[in-house]
Amino acid sequence: MNRLRPHTLKFKVALYLALALAVAMLLFTILVVRTQRNELLAGAVNHLNQISDVVIKSTRYAMLQNQPDYVFRIIQDVGHQENIDKVRILSKEGRIIHSSYAPEIGQKVDSTADGCILCHQGEKPLQQLPEGARSRIYSGPGGLRLLGSMEVIRNEPSCSSASCHVHSKAQSVLGVLDIVYSLGEIDQTMKENTLTIAAFSLGFIVIVSLLVSGFISRLVYRPLRDLESGAKRVSSGNLGQLIPVRSKDEFGQLAESFNAMTLALGNSQTELQEWARTLERKVAERTKELRIAEAETARTEKLASVGLLAAGIAHELNNPLTGVLTFSHLLRKKMPDGSQDAEDLDLVIRETKRCAAIIRRLLDFAREKPPEKKFADINKIIENTGRIIENPAAFRDIKIQMDLDPDLPPLWGDADLIEQVIMNMLVNAQHAIEHEGSITIRTRRVAKPLGQEPGDVPVPMVEISIIDSGCGISQENLKRVFDPFFTTKEVGKGTGLGLSVSHGIVKAHGGTIEVDSVVGKGSTFRVYLPLQPSSEDIAGDRVGSKP
């Protein structure tokens, strides 16, 4: 549960609302209390004036008959009424003639007292009280508030002519009736009413504050909290979770706009990520192409160097080698078989032929003869090539096995160059087996993409697998087996050009070579060649067929 903290909007709204309601209810309480007090005082004044009129009218006859005892009893009866503090009649000179409080009868009232100050403001007393000055409120002994009502008793002709009175007609005022009314009950009632109103006001403030706070929390604070949590999720990178739309008002519209913004940010982030992946893929492609181009450039430079070297060697050595080979054959014919000289000449002839073969391979590697493609039977090419090395392999107890798919369609390629590839690999496999082993040649039809991209469409290809049980190739050397002049054979048993030449031929046909090897168990070379001509080959045939 969220507690109200001083810095939160919920706390501020509740505080300001409570203060506003407190001020409003304070003003309302003051107004109600003042109005009620005025009404109670007005009622008390009216009641006191009525009592005063009744007393004057009740004592008029007794005064005419000069019956002071009767007047005294009336005053005593009125003085015993509830909240009546005192009832007395004052003479013109301010002396108390009758009073409900007997000890003060005969005493003279001070003209500056609360009951006399209204008439005795000057040298002569007033003959008529001002309008509205009949009643007054003052404090009695002990701080008790008292309400006094004064009524003038005037001389009448009937009173001045009576034998019981000695007042002349010139005397207009015979005395003053003064009734004092205690306001203690009214003050107590006002105090209780004030406390009651204050308690109700406080309860009203608390209830209204809670209700308004609840409404504000539901209508304002919860949407704001949703926006806050949504903003925190967005800042942390979570764009998949939307905030709830709780209403159709401005906050609901704001939540919908926030969700639309979050979705737009998510889409933008997805697009940026997709662009980043695309950029990375394109950079990888360009890097790969650049490396391939660098490798091709290096290989081209090597081929150019080899070509220059081969041309120089062919020019410098072919003619001397031809002469050495010719004269060696002529001398060999003159030597008897089995003689030491004949064996020496045979060695010279073999080494001369090997030198000529090396030069020829160098020339073939440097020239990179373009393939002359046409449909050919790949199984027949493999069978013919296998017969060539079958006898030398059998001499070393190497068994050659063929597992050829008879349903293979004709292959589009240069039969001579493909035969050279198979020959190079069979010779390498034969050299990898020291004694007693097997070489398996297998053909299968497969579907394989021409490139390495995920979206490349597989095309029908033939897989030529050459599996030997030889010594195998280490993982370090597997990466270099197709490099020119790289070989693991002993010196004098290889030039390191066979696999490089084969790789170039297969690549010129639009195929690939893969190799798997385990040291001590053997190697497997897989050659993949397209069965059908490519669009470039078809376009080239159309161009070449034009007159």
Image: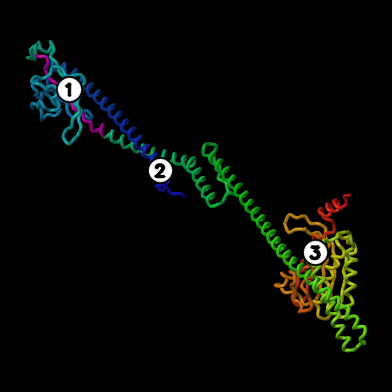
Q: How is the image coloured?
A: rainbow
Q: Residues within 10 Å of mark 2 (few under 14, many from 20)?
A: some
Mark yes or no: residue 496 visible. yes
> How far apart, in angstroms, are the residues tagged by discs 3 and 1?
144 Å
> Marks 3 and 2: CB-CB under 8 Å?
no
**Viewer-side residue, 145 vs 258:** 258
Instruction: Kindly identify the amino acid type of the residue bearing the numbered disc 2.
Output: Lys
Helix, strand or loop at mark 1: strand
Tell me which corner region of the image, top left, top right, bottom left or bottom right, holds residue 168: top left
Residue 319, image x, y percentages: 84, 74
Magenta range is: 171-187
Q: What residue is shown at x 87% (from left), y 83% (from top)?
A: 346
The circle drawn on residue 150 is 1
Q: Nearer the viewer, mark 3 or mark 1?
A: 3
Instruction: Kindly identify the amino acid type of the residue bearing the numbered disc 1.
Output: Met
> How far apart, in angstroms, are the residues tagged by discs 1 and 2?
57 Å
Residue 204, image x, y percentages: 39, 37
Locate residue 340 relative to residue 97 in the image: left or right: right
Instruction: Kindly identify the amino acid type of the residue bearing the numbered disc 3.
Output: Glu
**Viewer-side residue, 209 vs 527:** 527
- Dot 3 or dot 1: first in sequence order is 1
- The residue where tag 3 is placed is 368
Mark yes or no: residue 77 visible. no
- Dot 1 or dot 2: first in sequence order is 2
Tell me which corner region of the image, top left, top right, bottom left or bottom right, holds residue 175: top left
Residue 56, image x, y percentages: 18, 19
Locate residue 547 relative to residue 98 in the image: left or right: right
**Viewer-side residue, 454 vs 329:** 329
- Dot 3 or dot 2: first in sequence order is 2
> Marks 3 and 1: CB-CB under 8 Å?
no
